[in-house]
Image (cartoon, rainbow, N blue to C red):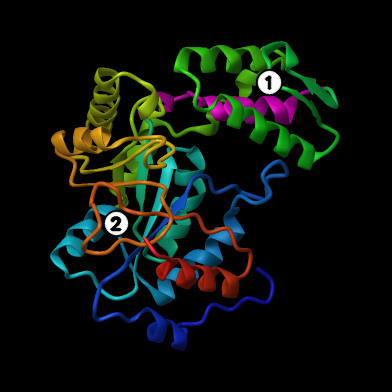
């Protein structure tokens, strides 16, 4: 980033984040790290942005994995300014772009991986995104399936279109959702060429060998609250089993798909994760976690700021957000 020099220490940071009365844990939530700015998703982080963010974090925070942080938090032994870096879903760019940057700054992260999309798969939401990205016309009419009609004149239009479509179908039953996704994809010839979006199994193993923590994220990334209990238990267990097969190590932490408590998952799903022996789990509820937090519903938030000062101020603001 032009004109940016990461400081070794932000003096005011220690003043505003020191808290003797209660340790607080910030957990950052990433998905993709693009090689360059993605025109249909300009707000998603690219390699340059991720680099200065990680340099800033390395110079100013105590970085732990989810498993390490949860254990210390519950014991009341969490260091000040503790922070955890997490990635959801299992995108190939996590291994190809994010990993070298993390290694450059000697940082550890936790990667929550939906195993059903490894080795050539593609998540349903990415099929929608890539369909809209590649749609050959300036108008996309999905009114036949009550999904609306959209202008695709520019990248902003295409971003807004895919966001609206995903919002309409996200919480539908899996079979109906997949039917609609396949129908949309059928309008775009050659869409299968984007199957490289997700990691290969050997890339998951590479993350593990580099000291990264691997966490469960189900097999097919369902909205757990929308599927039968037995199916939810299988999704959690089989995703974990596949990751343990790949890494040869116990998978101890879990992330709820989509992650909004009371909407995407329910207390019974926390019980399922606990009963299967996971030691901690994360949601996408914003804020920080303290020793009184439910270790199976740790808070996370997504940083999006495009300058170091704003990024740091948002970290501090989140640090004091009421839970």
Q: Earlier in the sequence, mark 1 or mark 2?
A: 2
Please tell me which residue lies in front, 28 or 165.
165
Residue at 31% from the left image edge and 35% from the top image edge: 266
Which quadrant is home to the C terminus?
A: bottom left
Secondary element at tag 1: loop
In the rendered image, residue 94, in percent from the top left (x then y), is placed at 47, 45
In the rendered image, residue 134, in percent from the top left (x then y), is placed at 73, 27
Per the model, the C-alpha gap separating discs 1 and 2 is 40 Å
In this rendering, the answer to whether 306 lies above or below 152 is below
Reading the image, the residue beneath label 2 is 65
Please tell me which residue lies in front, 106 or 165.
165
Secondary element at tag 2: loop
| Disc ID at residue 230 | none
Residue at 64% from the left image edge and 12% from the top image edge: 183
Residue 195 drawn in magenta: no
Please tell me which residue lies in front, 53 or 247.
53
Reading the image, the residue beneath label 1 is 147
Q: Main secondary structure of the magenta part?
A: helix
Q: Quadrant of residue 49?
A: bottom right
Magenta-drawn segment: 115-136
In the rendered image, residue 13, in percent from the top left (x then y), is placed at 43, 82
């Amino acid at each position: 980033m032009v004109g940016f020099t990461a400081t070794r220490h932000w003096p005011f940071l220690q003043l505003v984040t020191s808290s003797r009365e209660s340790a607080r844990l910030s957990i950052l939530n990433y998905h993709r790290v693009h090689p360059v700015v993605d025109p249909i998703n300009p707000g998603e982080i690219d390699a340059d942005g991720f680099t200065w963010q990680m340099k800033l974090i390395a110079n100013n925070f105590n970085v732990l994995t989810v498993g390490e942080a949860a254990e210390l938090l519950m014991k009341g032994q969490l260091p000040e300014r503790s922070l955890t870096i997490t990635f959801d879903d299992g995108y190939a760019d996590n291994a190809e772009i994010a990993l070298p940057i993390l290694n450059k700054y000697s940082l550890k992260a936790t990667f929550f991986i939906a195993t059903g999309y490894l080795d050539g798969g593609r998540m349903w939401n990415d099929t929608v995104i890539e369909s809209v990205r590649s749609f050959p016309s300036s108008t996309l009419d999905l009114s036949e399936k009550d999904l609306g009609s959209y202008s695709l004149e520019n990248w902003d239009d295409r971003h807004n279109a895919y966001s609206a479509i995903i919002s309409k179908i996200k919480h539908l039953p899996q079979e109906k959702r997949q039917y609609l996704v396949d129908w949309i994809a059928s309008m775009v010839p050659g869409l299968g060429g984007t199957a490289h979006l997700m990691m290969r199994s050997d890339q998951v193993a590479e993350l593990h060998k580099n000291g990264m923590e691997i966490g469960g994220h189900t097999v097919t990334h369902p909205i757990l609250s929308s599927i039968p209990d037995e199916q939810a238990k299988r999704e959690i267990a089989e995703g974990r089993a596949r990751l343990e097969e790949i890494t040869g190590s116990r998978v101890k932490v879990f992330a709820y798909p989509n992650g909004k408590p009371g909407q995407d998952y329910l207390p019974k799903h926390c019980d399922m994760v606990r009963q299967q022996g996971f030691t901690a789990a994360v949601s996408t509820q914003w804020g920080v976690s303290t020793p009184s937090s439910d270790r199976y519903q740790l808070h996370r938030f997504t940083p999006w700021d495009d300058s170091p000062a704003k990024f740091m101020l948002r970290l501090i603001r989140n640090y004091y957000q009421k839970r």
